[in-house]
Image: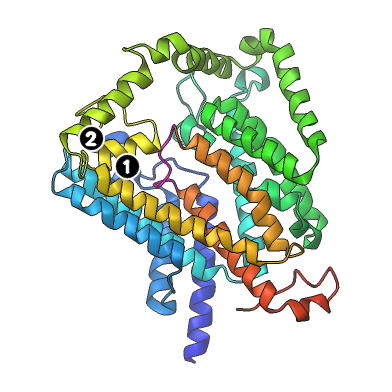
């Protein structure tokens, strides 16, 4: 009876976690908005995540791997900032958000154990990404389609559609593409159905288009860097040709952009004037210069703990810090920077295990294809803070689970060698 209870609970917890993954593509608040305070930040993914954590920790008692322990060390390094925070309530809320996401991460790593579980995660992410991208494209093409807007927003910029803003949309699509491209074009795809293969292909194309429409420069640069590294690793430089053709087509039609996609054209204009104008950006009163100078000022005021997470905005600047390194410096001080380095070291040490697997291990290949995209994401994160983003922890779950399956594949190598190609990607029971 107890075994049946554990199995049924783990199955329900797994469904809740997949609900968390699916709902991460919808970040509009359940109640209210910015004026509703903490309640206005709660989204459907948070409710699924809470259910996942409760079920997992009550019944399954998850084990902590190196990445989980490193993440806990990072959060612990943030706690002293509460004592000297420039905005105590927001700092406490922000640290609680970090703790919650790490608990979801630990739960996800415990629940996603087999190849089938991992494929269910991929499939759920693809469906959520495809739906969000389709809605995003339609919302930003109302001038062409004539359709009414389902998610009214600021007509001067990208309509967030299922996301609160273009930043969230671009960051989500970057992570989704980083996960799905190595899957579709690696050896793991040999064991999937034709319908799943088509799902991943269509999702990649539609999500890439929608990400371009967000004009989220950091996300676009991250995917481009990842794509170049991916093409070099696969020794298929021709993979870049379709990308260049699409970019060329967009450039050739740039004169009609304002007519066809006025919201996207307006956003490009704003981005060029505020982000890509080198003279303006690098001047003393430029956005980044002012932002980073204020972050350094917060660090000088309290080098040990900084201003406290979310203690910066409204005290040192009207904007939050637009960079992971500078946010760590200004809002968490030396303690937070050290904690982040511990987390990064734990993640890198875990990933280094791929050297122990033989080249024909499909999970090793997936990780090798994923690494260029992770590097591209890291470049993007130089401009945005990523540790509180749900999609970042989904990416980390994929990494940890793929490494576990890689190790298990090596352990059962003799058994797998005797199987056919269609079976070696079969159920790998824990």
Identify the disc placed on residue 19.
Answer: none
Q: Name the residue: 35% across, 57% down.
A: 100
Magenta-tinted stretch: 383-389
Report the front residue among 285 and 269.
Answer: 285
Give the residue furthest to the front: 355
Count the numbered circles shown. Answer: 2
Report the front residue among 22 and 104.
Answer: 104
Residue 311 in the figure: left or right of residue 406: left
Residue 256 in the figure: left or right of residue 295: right
- Mark-to-mark CA distance, 1 and 2: 30 Å
Q: Quadrant of the C terminus?
A: bottom right
- The local secondary structure at tag 1 comes to helix
Figure quadrant of residue 15: bottom right
Check disc 1 and report the residue beneath it. 40
Residue 388 lies within the magenta run: yes
**How are the colours assigned in the image?**
rainbow
Q: Name the residue: 73% across, 62% down.
A: 362
- The local secondary structure at tag 2 comes to helix
Query: N-terminal of the two: label 1 or label 2?
Result: 1
> How far across and down, in percent of the image, does residue 229 sit?
68, 40
Question: Residue 321: in sight, yes or no?
Answer: yes
The 10 Å Cα crowd at callout 2, few under 14, some 14 to 19, many 20 or more, is many
Give the residue furthest to the right: 420
- Is the stretch drawn in magenta largely helix, strand or loop? loop
Report the front residue among 187 and 355.
Answer: 355
Identify the disc placed on residue 299.
Answer: 2
> How far across and down, in percent of the image, does residue 364 sit?
68, 61
Residue 170 lies within the magenta run: no
Q: Name the residue: 46% across, 18% down.
A: 275
Q: Name the residue: 38% across, 69% down.
A: 54
């Amino acid at each position: 009876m107890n075994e049946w209870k554990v199995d049924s609970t783990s199955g329900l917890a797994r469904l809740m976690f997949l609900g968390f993954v699916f709902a991460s593509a919808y970040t509009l608040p359940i109640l209210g908005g910015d004026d509703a305070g903490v309640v206005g930040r709660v989204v459907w993914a948070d409710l699924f995540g809470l259910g996942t954590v409760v079920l997992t920790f009550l019944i399954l008692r998850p084990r902590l791997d190196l990445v989980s322990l490193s993440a806990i060390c990072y959060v612990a390094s943030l706690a002293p900032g509460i004592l000297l925070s420039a905005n105590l309530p927001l700092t406490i809320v922000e640290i609680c958000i970090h703790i919650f996401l790490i608990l979801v991460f630990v739960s996800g790593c415990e629940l996603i154990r087999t190849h089938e579980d991992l494929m269910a995660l991929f499939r759920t992410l693809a469906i959520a990404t495809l739906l969000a991208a389709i809605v995003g494209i339609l919302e930003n093409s109302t001038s062409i389609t004539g359709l009414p807007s389902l998610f009214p927003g600021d007509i001067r910029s990208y309509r967030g559609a299922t996301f609160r803003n273009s930043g969230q949309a671009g960051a989500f699509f970057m992570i989704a593409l980083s996960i799905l491209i190595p899957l579709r074009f690696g050896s793991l795809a040999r064991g999937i159905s034709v319908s799943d293969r088509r799902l991943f292909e269509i999702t990649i194309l539609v999500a890439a288009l929608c990400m371009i429409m967000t004009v989220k420069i950091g996300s676009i640069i991250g995917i481009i860097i990842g794509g170049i590294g991916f093409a070099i690793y696969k020794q298929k430089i021709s993979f870049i040709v379709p990308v260049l053709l699409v970019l060329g087509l967009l450039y050739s039609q740039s004169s009609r952009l304002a007519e066809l996609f006025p919201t996207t054209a307006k956003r490009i204009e704003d981005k060029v004037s505020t982000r890509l104008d080198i003279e303006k950006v690098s001047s003393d009163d430029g956005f980044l210069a002012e932002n980073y100078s204020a972050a350094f000022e917060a660090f000088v005021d309290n080098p040990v703990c900084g201003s406290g997470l979310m203690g910066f905005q409204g005290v040192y600047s009207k904007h939050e810090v637009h960079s992971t390194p500078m946010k760590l410096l200004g809002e968490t001080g030396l303690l937070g920077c050290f904690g982040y380095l511990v987390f990064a070291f734990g993640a890198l040490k875990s990933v280094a295990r791929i050297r122990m697997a033989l080249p024909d291990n499909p999970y090793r290949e997936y990780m090798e294809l994923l690494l260029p995209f992770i590097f591209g994401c890291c470049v993007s994160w130089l401009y945005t803070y990523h540790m509180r983003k749900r999609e970042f922890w989904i990416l980390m779950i994929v990494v940890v689970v793929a490494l576990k399956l890689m190790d298990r594949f090596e352990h059962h190598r003799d058994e797998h060698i005797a199987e056919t190609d269609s079976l070696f990607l079969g159920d790998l029971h824990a």
